Structure formats: C-alpha cells, structure tokens
Amino acid sequence: MADAMSLVHRLSSSGSSLRGALPSLHFPRRIPCLCKAPLRVVSMAMPGPIARPDDPFLARLAAAAQTPLGQAQLAQSSTVSNDNPPLLNIVTDPLCMAAPAQVERATSYNEHRPRKPPPDLPSLLLNSRIVYIGMPLVAAVTELVIAELLYLQWLDPRQPTYVYINSTGTSRADGETVGMETEGFAIYDTMMLVKNEIQTVAVGAAIGQACLLLAAGEKGKRYMLPHAKAMIQQPRLPSLGQMPASDIQIRAKEVVNNRDTLVSLLAKHTGNSFKKVAKIMQRPYYMEPRKAVEFGVADKILWRGQEAMSETLTPEQWDKKAGIRVLERPMTYGAGNSGLG
C-alpha cells in the first residue's frame, strides 16, 4: 500500500499521466483524497433554445438568442446559479412569456384596443364635424355649441358642419322656462357668422328656439327623421316671484320683442309671411316631418341615410325631369268658326 501511494505522488509531481499506470494498481474501496490540487472545471456552451414555428414562445426566444446580445447572455447563463435561471434575461417581449391561449387571446381580442382612454363622446362626434344639441338651451349648452362651431370653422371653413338637434329649446318638456331666449339667438347668430355650410338634422324634438335652429340650416339641406317633431311657440316669462309691477312690465315688453324677433326669423327661413307665422304661433303648433316640410321648417325626410321625401315637384317639372316633351294641343274650330269667309 505504501508503494502504491509513493508511486501516485511521484507521477502527480512529475506531471505524467496516470493513464496506463493506474490499471495495474489495486486500490481499496475507500481511498482518501490523494491530492489537494484544485480541480479544473471545463465550461461548456449552453445550447440555444429549440426553434418551433408553431410555438410563439420558442420561436421568439430562439430569434432573440441569435442576436449578438442574446449570444453574450447565453455565454453568461452557463455560470448562473439556480436563483437566476438561464435564458430568461434575453426575453424582452412580455408576449413571449404568456401561455399560448393568452397569446392567441391577446392578438385576436386586444389588437384593436386603444392604448389610451378614449375622449368624451362630444369630442368623438366633433372629429366627424357633428355638433349635437341634446339638451335644453341653457348657458352651458350654448357655450359648448358655439365653441364647437367656431372650432370647426377654424379647422376647415370649406367643409360642412352637421348640427343634430334634439332639444326643447329654452324650456323643458313640461313647459317650465330654464333658459333665456338669447341662448337660442346666440347659437343662431353663430351659425350665420361662420363660413361653413350648416346642415341641420332633427333627430327627436325641435321645439321653440330649437325649431329656429333647424330652419336656419342650409336651404335644401335641412333634414328630419321620420318620427321627429317640430314645434313653434311663443316665448314664455320665467317665474317672476315678488317683483314690482314696473319690473314685470319691463320683462313682459322684452318677451314681446323676443317673440317678434323669433317670428321674423322663422318667416325669413320658412318663406312664409310674418302675419302667417305670428298667427300660427299664438298657440303651440306641432309639426310632423311632412307637415314641417310643407311649412318650410325642413326640406327632406331621412330614412336609413336615404331621402324619403324631396321637394314637391309640379307635373311639368316631373315631365321635364323624365325627358318627356309635351306637345301643344292643336286648335279645333267649330262649324260656325271654320275660319273661312
């Protein structure tokens, strides 16, 4: 045993290989450490990930491993410990770390999801050049509508603006006054001020001042939906409460002036006389779409984007539009009017 130990020490100190010498020696089963020299660890390159085209995770992982950065990180991953598993630090796309079902769901359902919260609905309509009046004409509504009309003119004064109306004017549906008549006049004046072509559409109710806004649209491009309603009525005084008689008289005079202004504007845009409009407005006057077209508040009725009713044409206009030429009827002479002397 001592001879074998001395032989091993001599061979290891001389740097000779033990191969060929050790098979001729017989060692016991348990041998203490023969030398205290540190063992050399041979570093082996870790193989890259398997590329499978049908697996999104492995395909992206293999593509990332082929980059120079991925190769360098693969070389470092051979010496990492169990606390830091290899290959995970080269994945930069969070979609790669998802399960296949999550990847499929993410690409099919969420690819059109906006990256930021959408704006409010009036802003979305404004992108399509639509101004929607869907409340009674109070100060806040007037401010928003006027701002949108001015903004659309600044954006492009050559493009038309579409005003959709579903409003009870300066009063509520039960008749209570909620706004001053100047709110409707302010929107009307702005419509006349801007350079854009204003097309109006009644989608629900156009009552009082809202009916004026409907009639103030571009001639020939004032529309109503089949079940919309238009109504004209006289302005009303708000609740006066305990006021002096002189103040009530002043308020009443102002309401009369607003009524005359409303009548004159409706007569201008409908083509009727001032006297006729004033007589009709003595009581609330409701108009369905066909009646509104006849009165001159609207021009056409829309149904699914198509015109359901255009302006009424005379028989001669229909014949001319169809290309029919009407021949004059020849003169006939009676027995007593033969024309002969």
Image: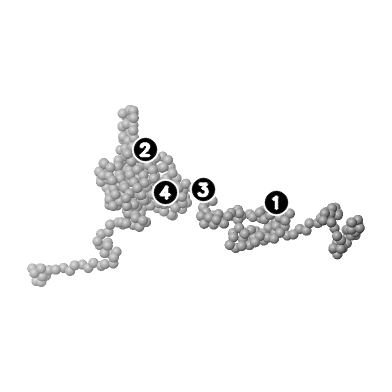
* Neighbourhood count class around disc 2 (C-alpha, 10 Å): few under 14, some 14–19, many 20 upward: some
Q: Residue at x 69, y 51 (%)?
A: 84
- Quadrant of the drawing holding the C terminus: bottom left
Amino acid type of the residue that numbered disc 3 sits on in the rendered structure: Pro
Q: CA distance from mark 4 to mark 1?
A: 63 Å
**Direction from residue 5 to residue 229 in the image, left or right:** left
Q: CA distance from mark 1 to mark 3?
A: 42 Å
Amino acid type of the residue that numbered disc 4 sits on in the rendered structure: Val
In this picture the colour scheme is one colour
* Neighbourhood count class around disc 1 (C-alpha, 10 Å): few under 14, some 14–19, many 20 upward: few
Amino acid type of the residue that numbered disc 1 sits on in the rendered structure: Asn
Q: CA distance from mark 1 to mark 2?
A: 74 Å
Residue that label 4 marks: 131
**Direction from residue 132 to residue 273 in the image, left or right:** left
The mark found on residue 178 in the picture is 2
The mark found on residue 117 in the picture is 3
Which label sits in the foreground, 1 or 2? Answer: 1
First in sequence: mark 4 vs mark 2: 4
